[in-house]
Image: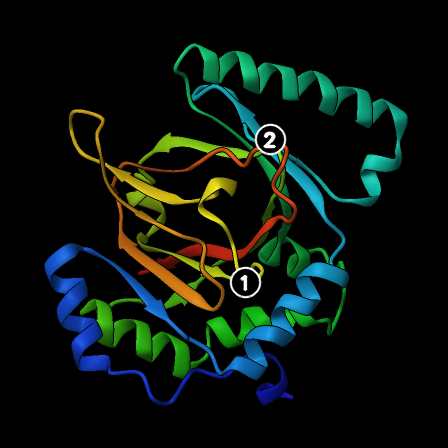
């Protein structure tokens, strides 16, 4: 079963990756998984996920999320529509905002959304010695003890505003994004992970290239760029934080 869902590429040059991460404090690891397992994960995201919605309208506002089945309630649907408008207002004022489809691996495990399902297994793999050991090796942070995570799909009109992940008290050390979207993502479709300097210029941007893992130390100012209405597919990813507690 493990080889059908999550298997690290055995040909990765870990020494070279560690050197690059040490210099830049961020890193793209292409072909992070074997091709077979990456495609299996993508298929689960595309056709085997009960997508909910997550959004936040303002830095001081609470983040909100709903399971996919909760969105069938007309009252919930109306609430989401109004909150989507609020995210637009917040972003237009330069305040923090985001919206995307989401499935929380941790909440799903705790609330038994799909006992024994693929996302429970994926969370186990992310916390297994193989993956955590690899993360300790290339980040140079031996204190990493666990990973949380959520599946996301940034579809048309979705975005993640500029922020810095400054949750030090919660043990966040390194943010990760495992990209699992289509093979030929086009730059015009947005969904880039971008990093800003102190003046607001973009220092670098990472395309959501299939089977590529993005890693970066937190806090760092970053965002996920707006996905326009003409994007033909969503930007699928598994994201979360590697933690020391």
**Image quadrant for the C terminus?**
bottom left
Which badge, 2 or 1, comes first in the chain's sequence? 2
The numbered disc on residue 157 is 2
* SS at circle 1: loop
Residue at the location (55% across, 30% down)?
63
Q: Is residue 29 above or below residue 185?
A: below
**Image quadrant for the N terminus?**
bottom right
Query: Are there few (<14), some (14-19), or many (20+) residues within 10 Å of tag 1?
Result: many
Can the viewer see residue 11 in this picture?
yes
Residue at the location (48% across, 71% down)?
126
Residue 127, image x, y percentages: 46, 73
Where on the picture, by quarter, is residue 78?
A: top right
Can the viewer see residue 245 in this picture?
no
Mark 2 in CB contact with mark 1 (< 8 angstroms): no
Q: Is residue 175 above or below residue 167?
A: below
Residue at the location (69% across, 68% down)?
43
Residue 171, image x, y percentages: 33, 52
Where on the picture, by quarter, is residue 40?
A: bottom right
* SS at circle 2: loop
Residue under label 1: 180
The numbered disc on residue 61 is none
Answer left or right for 71 relative to 59. right
Where on the picture, by quarter, is residue 80?
A: top right
Answer left or right for 12 relative to 41. left
């Amino acid at each position: 079963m493990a080889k059908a869902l999550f298997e690290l590429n055995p040909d990765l040059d870990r020494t070279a990756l560690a050197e690059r991460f040490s210099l830049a404090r961020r890193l793209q690891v292409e072909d992070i998984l074997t091709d077979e397992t990456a495609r299996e994960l993508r298929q689960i995201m595309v056709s085997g996920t009960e997508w909910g919605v997550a959004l936040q309208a303002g830095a001081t506002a609470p983040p909100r999320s709903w399971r996919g089945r909760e969105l069938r309630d007309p009252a919930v649907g109306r609430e989401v529509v109004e909150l989507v408008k609020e995210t637009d207002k917040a972003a237009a004022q330069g305040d923090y905002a985001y919206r995307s489809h989401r499935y929380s691996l941790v909440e799903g495990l705790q609330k038994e959304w799909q006992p024994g399902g693929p996302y429970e297994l994926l969370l186990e793999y992310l916390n297994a010695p193989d993956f955590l050991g690899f993360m300790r090796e290339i980040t140079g942070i031996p204190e990493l003890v666990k990973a949380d995570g959520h599946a996301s799909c940034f579809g048309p009109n979705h975005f993640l505003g500029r922020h810095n992940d400054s949750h030090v008290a919660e043990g966040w050390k390194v943010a990760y994004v495992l990209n699992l979207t289509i093979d030929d993502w086009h730059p015009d479709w947005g969904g880039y992970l971008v990093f800003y300097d102190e003046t607001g210029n973009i220092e670098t941007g990472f395309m959501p290239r299939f089977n590529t893992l993005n890693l970066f130390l937190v806090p760092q100012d970053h965002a996920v760029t707006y996905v326009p209405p003409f994007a033909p597919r969503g930007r699928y990813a598994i994201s979360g934080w590697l933690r020391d507690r």
